[in-house]
Image (cartoon, rainbow, N blue to C red):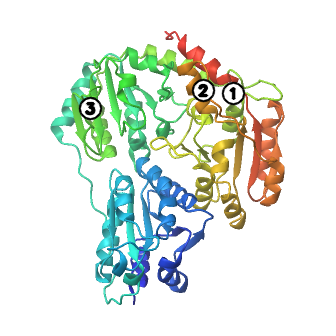
Amino acid sequence: MNAAQLMIRCLEEEGVRYLFGVPGEENADFMMALEDSSRIQFILTRHEQGAAFMAEVYGRLTGEVAVCLGTLGPGATNLITGVADGNMDRAPMLVITGQGASTRLHKESHQVMDVVAMFRPVTKWAVSVRNANDIPEIIRKAIRVATEEKPGAVHIELPEDVAKQLSSATPLTPFNSRRPVADEQSLDAALELIKQASRPIIIAGNGCIRRRASQALRQFCHLTGIGVLNTFMAKGAVDRNAPYCLYTIGLADKDMVGCGIDAADLILTLGYDMVEYPPSLWNPNRDKIIIHADFLPAEVDDHYNPEVECIGDLAATLTQLNKRLEVRPHLKFDLSQQAAVRRSMTEEIEAFKDDDADERIKPQKVLYDVRELLGPTDILLSDVGAHKMWIARYYQCDEPNTCLIPNGFCSMGFALPGAIAADLVYPDRKIMAICGDAGFLMNVQEMETARRLNSQLVVMVWNDGGHGLIKWKQENEFGRHTQLDFGNPHWLALAEAFSWNGHLISRSSEVKSVMQQALREPGPSLVVVPIDYRENQLLTQRLGDIQCPI
């Protein structure tokens, strides 16, 4: 077999199910091999960036690798934003790009650039195949690197002449390796700090929604009662209805959930990534006692100096702490502040549930109704924009991986292609994406992909005719904003052009009924809401005047 065929065989052996992308001349051998004999399903996308976002969401939802594909030159550069987003948001994914023949890579040549060097800063590993016989090792290493903690993107380049090389090599057999676990001394030290604390609190990061960590965390909270603040990407790590769920932390402004941290004398960070919410915002005086439990040692940061580090599989760490707590449960905590925080945030979430505004609809009302309509395992995907901040604060979850927010690299254009991948993974669940009008139009071409696949999904666009988040931030810092308004298409005509269902909402009382219809009707649906972003500054004012509940 040739190298391209061998690569396909190796991907099949690794259990790869989907490949998203846009082919080109330089990966034609790979595509022919894929079409001729592979069980892997190829999803033709309308842009490489959409392919990368689809692979990212597949990886986040399953913990397994999907492939995104592009050719050399512009195909590779089009991939890189989605790849960077997936890598920083800890999604296992494999990027495969074509390349010109190895005989012309040493000189100036049509469309040739150093693609591997370009991908190195945004992947865990990047390599170019130079010999067909190396492919089984390269694929095995790539999948292992992509899926081991912390997961991320890997890149393989296949030059067009190497793709034609003949090889008698065979795929390597995948195997599961056991993760290291935290040492007994650090676990005992962590337990002593917990026993000595009066007002401990947990910051749960995205590591808590992978593997068995969420289940172990819930048991830990059941044993201790300690409250949990989840980052944007850790929604659902604990059940939103649990008394120890203190909702979401991550807004740059001081929020009432931050009052729980202010009062805490011990912070347990579990699976926490600084890229989501830097410690300078929650430990400005560098005076918090911190236990760091994660798969990797703590990043060096002046505001983050853990007293104890429990390094190893996070679920195993929590399980071992749970065993210790079951035999030594003598804990004396004052959790009254945390209970007050939960009560106050619950009131905030419910404050506008009966709002009946017309023309412009409050974000809080929309999200309350969306939460009522989606079940515990249904999936909401957020794009990046002002709506992301509202979703982070007001949309809470029952289960892990049921609200996907890009919060490391924070790339706009994520949600529509991501929703297509989510529907492939969970065709029996309701899938909804919420986008700003700016972010939606960045990958609007994937409406055709959704129609071609007959994706069962709903995209809600919050329509304000401008870059709302940038306005919000500029107004907060400068008291004014630059020119950020733009025109939008005729939304129903856009839906019709792509053979989508289309709906316009004109007042708050219509949100639930229109969304119910969109979620029931077959095929993809577009729902457009005129959003009242005057609430952005009102929220900023409320947060600026916040008084910690007691």
Mark-to-mark CA distance, 1 and 2: 9 Å
**SS label for mark 3:** helix
Q: Which mark is residue 77?
A: none
Q: Earlier in the sequence, mark 3 or mark 2?
A: 3
Q: Tell which of 193 and 206 is nearer to you.
A: 206
Residue 454 vs residue 501: left or right? left
Residue 484 screen position, x and y as percent:
65, 34
What residue sits right under mark 2 in the picture?
Answer: 472
Label 1 crowd bin: few (<14), some (14–19), many (20+), radius 10 Å? many
Label 3 crowd bin: few (<14), some (14–19), many (20+), radius 10 Å? few
- Which residue in the rendered view is the most extreme toward the left? 185
**SS label for mark 2:** helix
**SS label for mark 1:** loop
Of badges 1 and 2, the one in the foreground is 2
**Residue plotted at (51% across, 66% down):** 75
What residue sits right under mark 3 in the picture?
Answer: 327
Tell whether label 2 touches label 3 (CB within 8 Å).
Answer: no
What residue sits right under mark 1 in the picture?
Answer: 533
Residue 417 screen position, x and y as percent:
60, 56
Tell whether label 2 touches label 1 (CB within 8 Å).
Answer: yes
Q: Is residue 245 above or below residue 460?
A: above
**Residue plotted at (44% across, 42% down):** 408
Of badges 3 and 2, the one in the foreground is 2
Residue 373 screen position, x and y as percent:
71, 40
Amino acid at the residue labelled 2: Trp
Tell whether label 3 touches label 1 (CB within 8 Å).
Answer: no
Amino acid at the residue labelled 3: Val
Q: Earlier in the sequence, mark 1 or mark 2?
A: 2
